[in-house]
Image (tube, helix red, strand yellow):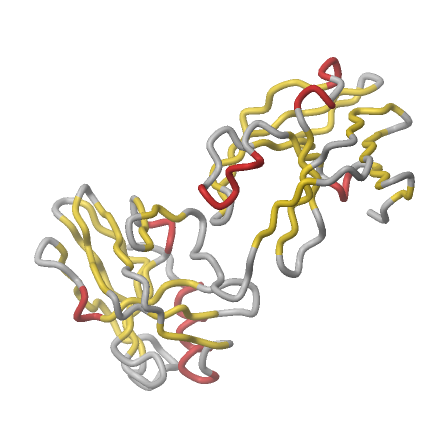
Amino acid sequence: MANNSDLVKLAQKLTAEGPHKYHATPRRVRGLLNGKYAFDTINAYHVWEHPYYPQFYVPSASFTADATLTTTSPIDGTNGGAHLARLSVGDKSTERVIVFNVAPLKDLVKIEFSELDQWFEEDVPIYQHPKDPFKRIDILNSTRSIKVALDGVTLAESVSPLFLLETSLRPRYYLLPTSVKWEYLTKSDTETYCPYKGKANYYNVKINGKEYKDLVWYYVYPTAESLPIAGHLCFYNEKVDVWVDGVQEEK
């Protein structure tokens, strides 16, 4: 049986205090498990379990004939307001599931995002977690100069960066590959996923015999909304020295 102690604590918190916030969404939301759609709904909710980003909670009535949703045990400390459950499609299942029986989440089901093979908003795959409908990304061409250095060594210089501005986060500067000094970069095996930008790959930086892991990232095939950054490189502002029009940023 899965160790669901974190789900138990989450259910106890949500049934006692409610979510940070929640909103119904008009988006069609589907989840793929074992090659079949486990649910298909236009009545999902964005639920913020914490202030940072939402998850999708789906109605218990939205599960398809290919899926079996079975409650396994009531969760202590919720007064019957939440149950752990198992979601199965064919011979594949997950027990990282909560069914809620109390307002404001009554009849909604939380499935751990990573437990499904793929989530979809309408016909678009989403990664890592749902996008926040109150958050946006702007990618702007700029002629402000960008210089990146580390340990006194210049790593990149550009006068044609892309400024990626994401709500509540610091600016990121995406640079053309010809702006970078490649002799200091080596490929990393790291991959990460962003709901707004897609799958990122990384480079390490090696200077004066010291290697700095995953200091640079790039997107080969970004999401449609972030397409302009394809092939550009971005240095981790917090870990390098960056000058914008000659003014050094704080890390």
Seen from the viewer's position, the closer of residues 59 and 225 is 225
Q: Residue at x 55, y 61 (%)?
A: 135
Residue 109, compared with residue 138, is above or below; it is: below
Give percent across and percent down for residue 219: 54, 32
User: In the picture, residue 16 is in which quadrant?
Assistant: bottom left
Q: Residue at x 50, y 48 (%)?
A: 196
Count of number-bearing discs: 0
Q: Residue at x 80, y 36 (%)?
A: 240
Give percent across and percent down for residue 33: 23, 47
Q: Return the residue found at the far left.
A: 65
Give percent across and percent down for residue 13: 46, 77
User: Where does the N terminus fall, quadrant-wise?
Assistant: bottom left
Residue 43 appears left or right of 227: left
User: In the picture, residue 113 is in which quadrant?
Assistant: bottom left
Residue 232, compared with residue 70, is above or below; it is: above
Q: Residue at x 81, y 17 (%)?
A: 209
Q: Return the residue found at the far top.
A: 183
Residue 22, compared with residue 1, is above or below; it is: below
Residue 249 appears left or right of 117: right
Give percent across and percent down for residue 246: 91, 39
Seen from the viewer's position, the closer of residues 120 and 34 is 120
Residue 185 appears left or right of 20: right
Residue 228, compared with residue 153, is above or below; it is: below
Seen from the viewer's position, the closer of residues 145 and 28 is 145
